[in-house]
Amino acid sequence: MLNIALAQINPTIGDFAGNIALHLDAARKARLDGADLVVFPELSLTGYYPADLLDDDDFQQRLDAALRDLMAASREVDSLYWVIGAPTRHAGVGKRYRNSLLVIKNGEVVLDYHKQLLPTYNVFDERRHFEPGPDVARVLRIAGVSVGFMVCEDGWNDDGRDYAVNPFQRLADAAPDLVVSINASPSHVGKREQRHAVFTAACRRHGLPLVYVNQVGGHDQLVYDGASFAVEPVRGVVFESSRFQQDVTTLGFDPHTARFSPRGGRDLPPVATQGLSPLAFYRRQIVLGLRDYARRCGFARVVVGCSGGIDSALTLALAVEALGAHRVAAITMPSRYSSTGSVSDSAQLCANLGIPLETCPIQDIVQQVGQTMSHSTLQLTPAGLALENLQARVRGTLLMTYSNTHGHLLLTTGNKSEIAVGYCTLYGDTNGGLGLIGDLFKTEVFALSRHLNECAGRELIPSAIIDKPPSAELAPDQRDTDSLPPYELLDEVLKVLIEGDRLAEWERARARSTYEDLRRTDEGRALLRRIKGMIARNEYKRRQAPPIIQLRGRAFGSGRQVPIAAMHDQDPGWKRLT
Ligand SMILES: Nc1ncnc2c1ncn2[C@@H]1O[C@H](COP(=O)(O)OP(=O)(O)OC[C@H]2O[C@@H]([n+]3cccc(C(=O)O)c3)[C@H](O)[C@@H]2O)[C@@H](O)[C@H]1O
Ligand SMILES: Nc1ncnc2c1ncn2[C@@H]1O[C@H](COP(=O)(O)OP(=O)(O)OP(=O)(O)O)[C@@H](O)[C@H]1O
Ligand SMILES: NC(=O)CC[C@H](N)C(=O)O
């Protein structure tokens, strides 16, 4: 019997002392639980993903020292095998580092393995920093059990197709009793189920049991849900660590039966195939994403402009859940175009959430800006769109002034639909340090708001806010639908155009059929061209936008890299100055 601890930790990138302490605490717990080896996530020493910090001299020196400190720390838990992840120096031609898995014991490296498949797609950019490891299998005998090792993406090329490099196949050829995979796998809706499908299929194909340990925590726009797991070749996933929090659990493994057992128990039931609902998932992902972003960047409090609309309401409700009511500030900034509901609904929302609502009307400043500009040599009186945007910019400026004064992090409130088509004001409502709902389509913003109310068993977000038609309230009687197609239609089209083959299977059929229906008529094709044009022409806004927490298969940000100064397909608004 081999006792193996799955140490799902939440390292902070570059906080070497803190990360070593996390390793040591987990190792001590593993020892108390009778573990022979403790398994940490990919790049557990640095945190995933250090990116260009790997090119920084000081970081490199701190990393070298930290690796020595971690080895020394391993002596404090006598004879325990630690499986850790760290960049290690690469001496040959090419990149300076490899993405490595090290097995250490009593201060010595007893095995090293270097990741072969370096993901460089979507949000990943590992080829930029790492040299791939050689096409070899690495196996070590621990407590009479032969254990083979791999790192994250190494396990994803085993789907029956004929890849040039398939580390899972290579390891299977070495016939270990057990596979240990260390990972930094960011989560989005459906990702947990995808991991289960990929690894149960490979384990079944090769008749191999596997332990998969993932990182947990929020790192900029990415959130890692943990959800580490153990797979038996016949029964599939039989254990799953808790999601969205650190977890150190020790399992027994019997090499004769290839089965796992809980500590002191006999058997494990198979884990349910279906995890959280999409809405429950979004909520937990955003809450952890904000919590870790705020604490890692040193923000005790956040501030949100509260319009009485659904986007700011949902942002506030999620911020209160993540940080507590005492850490969230809301400011209403009515203008002459604000409805009465804008302030009264904001007041009701804040009462429901238990936060005070500050008030700062903007009419005087907007007027003053107009007068200043018209009385200057500019002789310019802001009107039309310029006046609309001025209001949004005055609000953005006031919010940043509040942030500068009190040190609150400003949360931006844009959703994926409006970010896609540029229905937002640059340096106005796009101001902020982090977006919580920027990867939710507007229809999902409504659904998640209702979900929060259902979970609370009361109205957190007042139904008046949920039921009112979306409006920017920057001009008289303005409605979003004056400028945009109805969100029920727009969102389905955006799913196809933005997410494409990354669109989750459960929503693919509906989105595609809406899209294909539109392609059948002249009017529909014209609408598609218009939407494509809006997406293309607003690339520049997204390039300047704050990071948003990724929730879906393809989010704006590093996961979608599109040039700005380009001629985009079918863009009716494209013009070249000659
Ligand atoms: N390729 C490019 N590269 C760099 N910069 C570029 C650019 N193209 C335009 N620009 C700049 O961007 C400016 C236009 O962008 P911007 O000033 O943002 O203004 P714009 O996109 O023209 O207008 C904002 C739109 O968003 C709507 N809105 C505003 C606020 C809130 C909401 C809501 O409900 O959430 C909706 C508003 O009603 C309006 O339709 C141009 O004047 C130019 O300076
Ligand atoms: N009267 C206001 N008071 C305070 N903040 C405002 C006000 N109006 C707009 N904002 C800020 O600007 C953001 C964009 O608001 P706007 O109403 O223009 O569009 P929206 O996308 O429908 O957002 P929401 O649903 O929150 O109203 C809001 O989420 C809010 O943060
Ligand atoms: N760190 C990695 O290798 C991540 C890639 C992998 N396919 C995942 O997202 O799970």
Image (cartoon, rainbow, N blue to C red):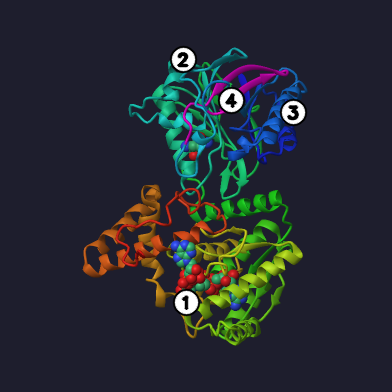
Tag in front: 1 or 3: 1
Task: Please tell me how crowded label 4 is: few (under 14), some (14-19), or many (20+) other residues with Cα within 10 Å.
Answer: many
Q: Which residues are magenta?
A: 95-119
Q: Which residue is mark 1?
A: 469
The extreme right residue here reads 76
The residue type indicated by label 4 comes to Leu
Task: Please tell me how crowded label 1 is: few (under 14), some (14-19), or many (20+) other residues with Cα within 10 Å.
Answer: few
Beta carbon of the mark 2 residue lies under 8 A of ligand 3: no
In whole angstroms, how far apart are the C-alphas of marks 4 and 2? Answer: 18 Å
Quarter of the rendered structure image containing ligand 2: bottom right
Q: Which residue is mark 3?
A: 28
Residue at disc 3, secondary structure:
helix
Residue at disc 1, secondary structure:
loop
The residue type indicated by label 2 comes to Ala
| Residue that appears at 52% across and 66% down | 450
Q: Which residue is mark 4?
A: 101
| Residue that appears at 36% across and 56% down | 497
- First-in-chain label (1 vs 2): 2
* 339 vs 451, nearest the viewer: 339
Residue at disc 2, secondary structure:
loop
In whole angstroms, how far apart are the C-alphas of marks 4 and 1? Answer: 53 Å
Question: On the rendered structure, is 212 left or right of 517?
Answer: right
Task: Please tell me how crowded label 2 is: few (under 14), some (14-19), or many (20+) other residues with Cα within 10 Å.
Answer: some
The picture quadrant where one finds residue 312 is bottom right
- First-in-chain label (4 vs 1): 4
Q: Position of residue 202 (x, y in %)?
A: 42, 28
Q: Position of residue 183 (x, y in %)?
A: 55, 34
Mark 1 and mark 3 in contact? Answer it, CB < 8 Å.
no
